[in-house]
Image: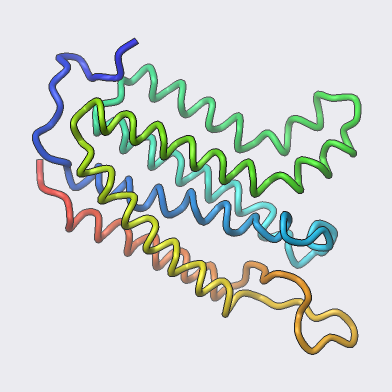
Amino acid sequence: MSVAQPGGVAPAAPSRHALAQLAAGGFLLLDGALFAAPFLLSGRAQGNDVFLTNLFLAPLISLLGGLLYILALRRLGLSIILVLILIAVNLAVLTSWLWLPQVTGNGVVLAIGVLALLPVILLVDAALLFLIGALVAWTQRQWDAWTRGILLALVTGGALAVVYSFFGGQYLAFGEKTSSLPPYLNGVTLAATAALAVLAYLLGWRWGRPQ
């Protein structure tokens, strides 16, 4: 099955919509993995209520980022059939930590294991989407658009990682003066996420060309 749109003619230049969606979508995909990272870095985070925001928002942020990113691939030339397949597969992967324990015999044990692997699931999902995006960009002669979008996603994602590291919530156990746990999602980090997502989109829009 071809990834090309009907007619097989790729646009001469990346549109503003495509580049903006690539940048913002890629940024959110990386953020989902970042916010799930505490469950991989510390086993104690899995049983601590302060990380519930991370638990529920990390997959949702990745899901939103994946949708924006896949829609951008459609603008780069991915066929509508493959877009729908990719959306369905992406949704199944990102929600696997919820439904997989329900369809197996060892639900509780598997739920704990999936929770520990949540950051890996989100990171692998982002990596696969980036790889598919690179393939689509290469075959549609839109490599310049894809590299610009991913560059913006990496730069803004790196900025958010710094903000999260220094200004994320810190849980202090009894007797601790410095937290032994990774930072958790708080208002400052969420505000920075929203602001940087908008910035990534606007920079992508400015860097692209009108259709």
Residue at the (54%, 26%) spot, across then down: 89
Res 184 quadrant in image = bottom right
Q: Is residue 7 left or right of residue 70?
A: left
* In the displayed structure image, the side of residue 102 where residue 170 appears, left or right: left
The x and y percentages for residue 206 are 17, 58
Q: How many marks?
A: 0
130 and 23: which one is in front?
130
Residue 6 found in image quarter: top left
| Rendered-image quadrant of the C terminus | top left
Taking the spot 11% from the left edge, 39% from the top edge, the residue there is 13
Residue depicted at x 60% and y 29%: 92
Q: Residue furthest top?
A: 1
Is residue 148 shown left or right of residue 133? left
Looking at the image, residue 119 lies above or below residue 156? above
**Place of residue 155 in the rendered image (x, y in percent of width and height, measured from the top left):** 37, 63
Up the image or down, 177 lies above or below 28; here it is below
Of 91 and 34, the residue lying toward us = 34
